[in-house]
């Protein structure tokens, strides 16, 4: 098999172009690719956007205006691995703006209903510490948080 990569398709209800523009504005290295429009063959209105390709953080996506039949849920989420607190704050604020919402344990849902995990450096290491007691204390602390606070998780892991 060849390594041809993959593209994540996100199903929207008429606002795929708006979503793509939003995501490329949030992720600094994002870009919009090709846009295809419905023709008289349908099923969408002729001339309206059928799909829009975009890329963020090196990952290829296509936004499909497929209609109201399917919506996003928490079964699928995208992890954003952040280098520092400033990056965590940036993505947290950007993704919860304009109708997005904080969920729990570092998860947010953006205004389109897509779930994101904003993961600060060190968080995964704390909850997967080889010492099961440290990992349990860090996990217990994490479970009380919306936006993850690695310093507080570390303090809990250390027994403080």
Image (spheres, grey):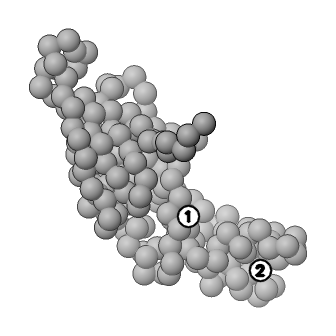
Front position in the image: 23 or 139: 23
How many numbered discs, if any?
Answer: 2
* Location of the C terminus (image quadrant): bottom right
Mark 1 = which residue? Answer: 106
Label 2 CA crowd tier, 10 Å (few <14, some 14–19, many 20+): many
Q: Of all residues shown, which one is farthest toward the top?
A: 41
Q: Of all residues shown, which one is farthest toward the left?
A: 47
Q: Is residue 13 visible?
A: no
Estimate the x, y position of residue 92 in percent, counting from the top left: 42, 67
Picture disc at residue 157: 2
Is 154 placed above or below 75 here? below
Front position in the image: 58 or 125: 58
Say which residue appears at 14% left-offset and 13% top-offset.
40
Tell me which label, 1 or 2, sits earlier in the chain: 1
Residues at circles 1 and 2 in contact by the CB criterion of under 8 Å? no
> In this rendering, would 96 be left or right of 134?
left
Say which residue appears at 21% left-offset and 38% top-offset.
35
- Per the image, label 2 sits on a secondary structure element best described as helix
Say which residue appears at 79% left-offset and 86% top-offset.
158
> In this rendering, would 70 be left or right of 98?
right
Label 1 CA crowd tier, 10 Å (few <14, some 14–19, many 20+): many
Estimate the x, y position of residue 80 in percent, counting from the top left: 50, 63
Picture disc at residue 49: none
- Per the image, label 1 sits on a secondary structure element best described as loop
* Location of the N terminus (image quadrant): top right
Q: Is residue 139 visible?
A: yes
Q: Quadrant of residue 69?
A: top left
> In this rendering, would 97 be left or right of 159?
left
């Amino acid at each position: 098999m060849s390594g041809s990569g993959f593209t994540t398709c996100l199903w929207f209800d008429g606002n795929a172009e708006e979503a793509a523009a939003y995501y490329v504005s949030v992720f600094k290295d994002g870009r919009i690719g090709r846009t295809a429009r419905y023709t008289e063959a349908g099923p969408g209105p002729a001339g309206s956007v059928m799909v829009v390709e975009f890329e963020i953080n090196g990952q290829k996506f296509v936004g499909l205006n497929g209609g109201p039949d399917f919506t996003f849920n928490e079964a699928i989420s995208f992890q954003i691995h952040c280098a520092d607190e400033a990056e965590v704050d940036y993505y947290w604020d950007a993704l919860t703006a304009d109708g997005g919402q904080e969920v729990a344990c570092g998860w947010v849902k953006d205004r389109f209903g897509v779930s994101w995990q904003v993961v600060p450096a060190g968080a995964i290491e704390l909850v997967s510490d080889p010492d099961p007691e440290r990992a349990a204390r860090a996990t217990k602390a994490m479970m009380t948080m919306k936006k993850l606070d690695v310093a507080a998780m570390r303090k809990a892991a250390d027994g403080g």
